[in-house]
Image: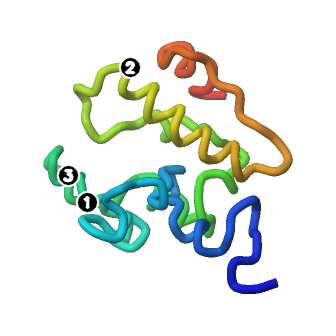
Amino acid sequence: MNAEEREIGLSVTEKEEINPCGTYCGKCDDYGGVCDGCRNRNGIPLWYHLYGRKETCGYFQCCAASGKHDCSECSQLPCEKYFEYPDPNMSDEFKQMWFKLRIDNFNEILLTSKIVIEGDFQKNLLKFKKK
């Protein structure tokens, strides 16, 4: 197979474009122009400054510490940390949209199991936190 050989449901290129949290840079209009992706920024998303944050993203830190490429390689997904967001004032509707987007991306690449989520953020908190 060539350089685009499939790896866990993604091509090699696509795998480099998925961030530890499951955000897929390859689907973003800003990627390659305004933004080069948090993986290429050592885990500091371009938009973190909007919330006054300067530290490395917690998902990036966790994956780096455990030697994982992204959270889909972890048996704990979605763990308690997965429900942490940079903006404490973010609405539950926005958190749910972001959570669903990332889990949907991981469900595309997981070969052995799929994560079934609820349609409401608070229900997902109850379902997955401290599991």
The residue lying at 25 percent from left, 60 percent from top is 46
Three-letter amino acid code at the position of disc 3: Arg
Q: Relative to residue 125, is residue 58 depicted above or below?
A: below
Three-letter amino acid code at the position of disc 1: Leu
The residue lying at 15 percent from left, 47 percent from top is 50
Q: Which color scheme does this rendered protein use? A: rainbow
Specify which label sits upstream in the sequence, 1 or 3. Answer: 1
Camera-side mark, 1 or 3: 1
x and y, in percent, of residue 109 in the image? 71, 53
Label 1 Cα neighbours within 10 Å, binned few <14 / some 14-19 / many ≥20: few
Specify which label sits upstream in the sequence, 2 or 1. Answer: 1
Specify which label sits upstream in the sequence, 3 or 2. Answer: 3
x and y, in percent, of residue 93 in the image? 38, 19
x and y, in percent, of residue 76 in the image? 67, 43
Three-letter amino acid code at the position of disc 2: Glu
Residues at marks 1 and 3 touching, judged by CB atoms closer than 8 Å = no
Q: Which residue occupies the extreme front position in the image?
A: 29
In the image shown, does 117 or 55 lie closer to the viewer?
117
x and y, in percent, of residue 61 in the image? 45, 61
**Which residue matches tag 3?**
53
Camera-side mark, 3 or 2: 2
- Residue 93 is marked as 2
Report, in whole angstroms, how far the alpha carbon at label 1 lies from the one at label 3. Answer: 10 Å
- Residue 46 is marked as 1
Q: Relative to residue 124, is residue 104 depicted above or below?
A: below
The residue lying at 40 percent from left, 28 percent from top is 95
- Residue 2 is marked as none
